[in-house]
């Protein structure tokens, strides 16, 4: 077999089990207790007693990653992602199966991974490089680039135990990215740090693919997964429930979240928000349905192509006619943390304001084509009595949908893959 065509990562039948003890015992043990266990169960390995059970964090998973690929791993908390990454990083041994990684491997699984807190930033760079098998001369040749990218020049000779979490992750990411491992394993690395550094890190990860390096990328941000990865797997309960191209990966994740996430007041998050019992109410109006349609008014439940106009539709009942009432929607990133934009019915000239009389009404808010980039977003209905109060404010409105936006047909032959950022307008 030609070695150049071998997978960079090959996982075959990988499983990992842990023993859970259900005894009500103290949270500590003495040396005497430990010696007692050693002599009473000297050869026990993996067998559970009546007060214990075996928990399978990973259960017979297999996949391959090609050289130069950015491979996504997604799944809800507790699905087995962290266990898998620890096995790939040689931190944890599997119970059965094998994980073959070809070449030098660098991992950034959490803030400060691989750093000695007593050493300075400078010393940790050389320490990490030596762990990768690099010579002092090779590390020195990359040193200035690492420090410049990390933005911690002032503190490079300060022990890293005094670093903030943001400084930690900036330096750790810079070391992992610039010391040129063959395989780079990143777990939620973009969740820490400011927006500017996150953008810089995204671009650096994309550069690694051009250098032929392989990246395992784990994130809860579907927009980052879509932008960076070409394929991946989804884990659930320690099993692989999807393996394949990134569009199908995100669609699977979206559908599973729609099944499992609820609003807490009885409504479902999904392609259609309904509130027939009026449990979310105000003194101005009662919302009944929220959904997305195409230009012809046909309800859309699939990922929205971003080269077509779509409409957010709200059906409700106004309790009174009030000229101060304005209604609109807000758009948030996939984690609901960053407000991208919001719009209200009174944003334009007064002659264009919709007149909402007492009784049933339907409002449509446009989501223009070529605005949102491919990704995963949260849309919320917002409303206010102008100048008086928020009725449903952009931060806490519970009238919301989660949508997936996909790339439509590309007008430009140069943008066959994703573009950076949350927006992808054509100016």
Image (cartoon, rainbow, N blue to C red):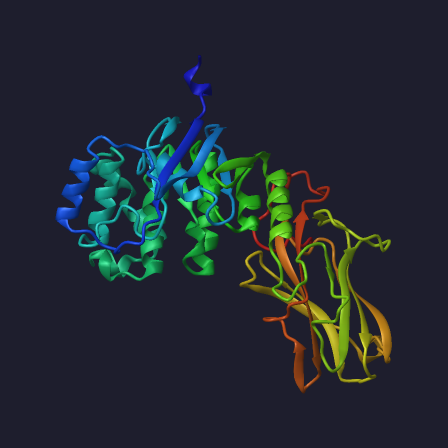
Instruction: Give me the residue at 32% from left, 48% from top.
Output: 146
Instruction: Give me the residue at 70% from left, 53% from top.
Output: 370
Quarter that holds the N terminus: top left
Please name whichever residue, 323 or 227, is drawn nearer the observer in this view of the structure: 323
Residue 141, placed above or below residue 287: above
Q: Position of residue 185 (x, y in %)?
A: 40, 40
Please name whichever residue, 321 or 164, is drawn nearer the observer in this view of the structure: 321
Q: Position of residue 375 (x, y in %)?
A: 61, 50
Please name whichever residue, 315 or 417, is drawn nearer the observer in this view of the structure: 315
Is residue 145 found left or right of 42 in the rendered image?
right
Instruction: Give me the residue at 52% from left, 35% from top.
Output: 240
Please name whichever residue, 314 or 142, is drawn nearer the observer in this view of the structure: 314
Is residue 420 found left or right of 26 in the rendered image?
right
Is residue 85 found left or right of 264 in the rendered image?
left
Is residue 216 found left or right of 91 in the rendered image?
right
Quarter that holds the C terminus: bottom right
Count of marks, rendered view: 0
Q: Position of residue 392 (x, y in %)?
A: 66, 75
Question: Which residue is farthest top?
Answer: 1
Residue 375 seen in the figure? no
Residue 279, placed above or below residue 79: below
Location of residue 179 by image quarter: top left
Residue 146 seen in the figure? yes
């Amino acid at each position: 077999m030609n070695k150049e065509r071998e997978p960079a990562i090959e996982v075959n039948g990988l499983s990992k089990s842990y023993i859970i003890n259900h005894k009500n015992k103290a949270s500590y043990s003495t040396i005497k207790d430990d010696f007692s266990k050693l002599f009473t169960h000297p050869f026990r390995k993996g067998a559970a007693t009546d007060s214990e059970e075996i928990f399978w964090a990973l259960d017979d998973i297999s996949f391959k990653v090609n050289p130069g690929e950015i491979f996504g791993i997604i799944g809800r908390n507790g699905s087995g992602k962290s266990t898998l990454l620890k096995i790939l990083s040689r931190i944890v041994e599997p119970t059965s199966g094998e994980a073959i990684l070809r070449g030098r491997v660098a991992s950034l699984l959490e803030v400060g991974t691989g750093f000695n807190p007593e050493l300075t930033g400078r010393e940790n760079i050389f320490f990490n490089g030596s762990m990768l098998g690099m010579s002092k001369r090779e590390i020195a040749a990359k040193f200035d680039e690492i420090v410049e990218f990390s933005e911690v020049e002032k503190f490079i000779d300060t022990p890293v135990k005094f670093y903030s979490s943001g400084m930690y992750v900036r330096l750790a990411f810079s070391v992992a990215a610039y010391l040129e491992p063959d395989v780079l394993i990143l777990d939620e690395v973009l969740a820490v740090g400011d927006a500017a550094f996150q953008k810089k890190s995204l671009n650096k990860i994309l550069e690694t693919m051009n250098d032929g390096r392989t990246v395992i990328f784990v994130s809860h941000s579907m927009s980052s997964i879509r932008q960076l990865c070409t394929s991946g797997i989804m884990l659930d309960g320690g099993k692989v429930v999807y393996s394949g191209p990134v569009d199908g990966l995100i669609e699977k994740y979206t559908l599973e979240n729609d099944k499992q996430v609820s609003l807490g007041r009885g409504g479902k998050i999904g392609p259609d928000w309904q509130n027939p019992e009026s449990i979310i109410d105000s003194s101005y109006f009662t919302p009944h349905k929220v959904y997305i349609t195409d230009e012809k008014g046909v309800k859309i439940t699939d990922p929205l192509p971003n080269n077509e106009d779509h409409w957010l539709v709200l059906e409700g009942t106004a309790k009174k006619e009030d000229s101060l009432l304005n209604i609109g929607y807000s758009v948030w990133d996939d984690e609901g943390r960053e407000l991208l934009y919001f719009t209200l019915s009174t944003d334009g000239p007064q002659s264009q304001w919709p007149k909402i009389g007492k009784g049933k009404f339907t409002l449509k808010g446009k989501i223009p084509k070529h605005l949102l980039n491919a990704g995963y977003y949260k849309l919320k209905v917002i409303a206010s009595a102008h100048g008086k109060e928020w009725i449903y404010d952009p931060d806490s409105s519970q009238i919301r949908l989660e949508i997936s936006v996909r790339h439509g047909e590309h007008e430009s032959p140069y943008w066959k893959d994703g573009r950076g950022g949350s927006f992808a307008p054509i100016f």
